[in-house]
Image (cartoon, rainbow, N blue to C red):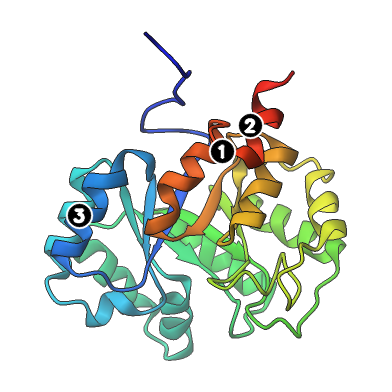
Amino acid sequence: MKLIDQRPTKPRQTGKTNVLDKGLGLEQLKMQLEACGEFIDVIKLGWGTSLVTPNLEAKLDLIKSHGIEPCLGGTLFEYCYLTNKVDEYIDFLKQHKLSLIEISDGTISIPQKEKNELISRFAKDFTVLSEVGSKDDKVVVSPSKWVEQIKSEINAGAKSIILEGRESGTAGLYRGDGEIRMGLVEEVMESGVEIDKLIFEAPKKAHQVFMIKQYGRDVNMGNIAYEDVISLETLRLGLRSDTLCSIHLK
């Protein structure tokens, strides 16, 4: 007897759940993927953890074996840009057979024209996820500037745009206390950019509930913790009080 309409299986084009990996070892990762791997679309090895991860190749192979795309953190790209090692970074990505790349400027400043050129360059060999928004909660960028940057980076070749929220949910889309910047989110959603091209960083349950209630169960979300993957899937399916009515009462 079928109790629930499951969401599409991988590879999914919408409703992607992107997990932030902060340095799990192989055995820990195996346990996590056995528990919830079918609901994960992308695993991002946070910031520069990939450079200090023992058995990196084995970890990447394990991730791929579950139909999950591995991706390295945007801060690692910023490090390589800052230290003039972009060419070496490209070699590193190819050496490890990585096809997904995050390009960000959330910590350092990269002129928009130059960032677009970098996106176009990487897009020739990789699938580019470009991140918009600052990691500093004291930096407030106008909604119109966000929209301008999003459109510019899509035109430059980014497949998807990650909307910054940090691991803590206290920057970018959110205020320092975690409150959602409603005006910003609304202006982005009214800009004409396809929602399927957007990935909302939503590390907190309240953020996840808001996104699902506002934009449906198949909204793309990132910076999800391993321990929250099953919880998020139940929110998407309306199997938790927070979204039960919004999903099933039409």
The answer to whether residue 157 of the structure is visible from this angle is: no
Would you say 31 lies left or right of 169 here? left
In this view, 196 is above or below 113: above
Q: Which is more N-terminal, label 1 or label 3?
A: 3
Other residues around mark 1 within 10 Å, as few (<14) / some (14–19) / many (≥20):
some
Q: Residue at x 31, y 78 (%)?
A: 49
Q: Which element type, helix, strand or loop, lies under badge 2?
A: helix
Q: Residue at x 36, y 32 (%)?
A: 10
Residue 244 is labelled as 2
In this view, 21 is above or below 127: below
Q: Which element type, helix, strand or loop, lies under badge 1?
A: loop
Quarter placement of the N terminus: top left
Q: Among all residues in the image, which is located at the extreme front?
A: 241
Would you say 131 lies left or right of 47 here? right
CA–CA distance between discs 3 and 2? 29 Å
Other residues around mark 3 within 10 Å, as few (<14) / some (14–19) / many (≥20):
few
Under mark 2, the amino acid is Leu
Answer with the quarter of the image where residue 31 lies: bottom left
Answer with the quarter of the image where residue 150 lies: bottom right
Check disc 3 and report the residue beneath it. Answer: 31
Q: Which is more N-terminal, label 2 or label 3?
A: 3
Check disc 1 and report the residue beneath it. Answer: 240
The answer to which of 190 and 20 lies nearer the viewer is 20
On the image, the x and y values in percent for residue 250 come to 74, 18
- Are the residues flagged by discs 2 and 1 in contact, CB closer than 8 Å? yes
Q: Residue at x 79, y 45 (%)?
A: 189
On the image, the x and y values in percent for residue 57 come to 14, 64
